[in-house]
Structures are given as structure tokens and as C-alpha cells.
Amino acid sequence: MTATELTVVGMGMIGASAALALRPQFEQISIVEPDDSHAEHALGTGQADRRVDEVPERTDAVLLACPSDRIAGWIAVLKDYPATIMDTGSVKGALVREVREKAQRLPSNWVPCHPIAGLERSGPMVADADLFRGRKLILTPEAETATAHVERARSWWQSAGALVEEMDAEDHDQVYARTSHLPHLLAFAYLLGIEESDLVHTGGGFRDFSRIGGSDPVMWSGVFERNAPALLAALDEFEGHLGEFRQAIETGDMDRCRSLIAAARARRSGEGSR
């Protein structure tokens, strides 16, 4: 579905990668980006064609890849535009509530999106046109979302190689609290206990577990704030499992410890759900 113009708000790693991935579907890529260095890089490397101060009224699509606390405000501004509005926020339920409050309704042209793709690095300098290829892209349309806009969003993301699925917003937040938000929280907490002198003794386990600990503090504190109820529930469950390991180790019950590890390993391989 080739259209005339895509406007990307926020040229971080996700926004810039989306601009590259979706470029074949649009004749022109415009960007709204307050950071001069990011905008200059995007324009200089062909990620975008022009920089604008506001989203043009006749743009065909808008991708809101800005910080999560600004998405609802943008949607309120764009609610009467003809464009299909997409976002990249990783928390959907809280965003729906924010949009209802700020826009006084859910716009029919807004398709809530969550690309399950990313890196711990940030900025357009690390953009990757193949970032979404083979990765899940979750749509959480509400009853008010027009089917035509959902299908446009689906078509564009599929053109970027994404595996598009639909979920209920609240279900989405509970699932990704467990599979994404909690792992980031645990990595951050773990790294607080690492001394500088420890770093010369790290191996693959440290690299694998700590990689996401290099993620952006502003972005992730916003995710934690917006998905606090689901994240706290996931943290409670984790603390329960951690307590089981502690008790097994304290009492020397290695049969129980091995049983817990085997159960965890089965979950990791998917055997526990068969």
C-alpha cells in the first residue's frame, strides 16, 4: 500500500529504524525531531527527506516514536487528522486511559502498536532497516478504532517484515510485564550489586543477563510507571519463586533446587506449556 507521506515523531533508534523499514511504502518521510543532532543525522543519511515543526495536516500516516509520556498529547492533537496514527509505546492500557482523558475520546484513526524489537542502544545512529523483520508487532485496537486504519497499519508493518498480531490492551500489559518489563527491572537491580572490580571476571552469563541493563533510564522508568500494577504483580510472583530457591539453598535441599531448575529449564524451552 504505497502512500504519499509518513511523518515520524521522534527519531530515536525505533523511529529511525521504522523510517528506513517503511520507506518503500511512502514517497516522502517527514520528521518532527527536537534534537538537532538526531535530525541532522536522519536527513544526512537518507533516513528522512525533510524536517517539520508540526505534523502536516495532509500526511497519510503518523508514527509516534517519541517518549511515552508525550504520546497521548500528540494523539489528542492529531485526533481529527485523516492520517492513520500509530505509536510504539510498550504499555497500552495506561495509554488508552491517558488518551481518553486528553482527547476526551478514543480517535478512530489511532491504532495502538507495540513493536517487539529494540536494542539497548539509542539514537538514529544505530537504526536498522531490518529491525522489525521476523519480529512480533502487536496491535491493540479498541472498539473505537476504525477497521480501515487497522488494516493500513497491519499492511505497513507487514511490509517491514513484522509478524503482526492483535491483543487486548490489558492482556498485552500483563504478558509484557512478565516477558519484558520485569527482566529489565531485574537486570537493573542486579547491576547495582556489581563492583567495578568484578567486571574483569565476567563471562557469557554476565553478558547475556546484563545486556538490557544498558537501556535508557528515561524510557524504562516511564514504562515502569505506566505499567506499575502488572509489573508489581509479576515482581510479587518472582519474589515467591526466588524465595523457593533461597529456602532450598539455605536448607541444603538440592533435590528441590534441581527440581526448580528443571522446571525453569522446561519453561525456557517451551516444554512446560506442552
Image (tube, rainbow, N blue to C red):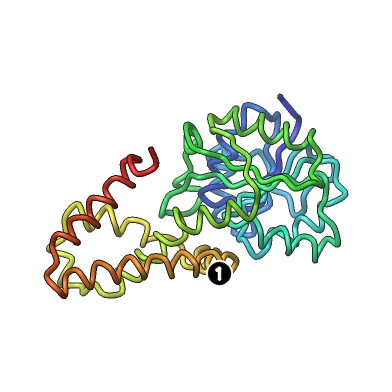
Q: Residue visible at 85% across and 41% down?
A: 82
**28 or 219, nearer to the observer:** 219
> How far across and how far down the image is residue 204, in percent?
19, 51
> How far across and how far down the image is residue 50, in percent?
68, 42
> How far across and how far down the image is residue 114, in percent?
59, 47
**110 or 142, nearer to the observer:** 142
Q: Secondary structure at mark 1?
A: helix
224 above or below 144?
below
Left or right, residue 164 beside residue 184: right
**67 or 176, nearer to the observer:** 176
2 above or below 102?
above
263 above or below 50?
below
Q: Residue visible at 62% across and 31% down?
A: 23
Q: Residue furthest top?
A: 1
Number of callouts: 1
Q: Amino acid at mark 1?
A: Ala
Quadrant location of the N terminus in the rendered image: top right
Q: Residue visible at 59% across and 42% down?
A: 138
Left or right, residue 48 beside residue 204: right
Q: Determine which residue is flagged by label 1.
A: 228
Classify mark 1: residues with Cα within 10 Å, few (<14), some (14-19) or many (20+): some
Quadrant location of the C terminus in the rendered image: top left
Q: Residue 154's image quarter? A: top right
Q: Residue 24's image quarter? A: top right
Q: Residue visible at 62% across and 44% down?
A: 167
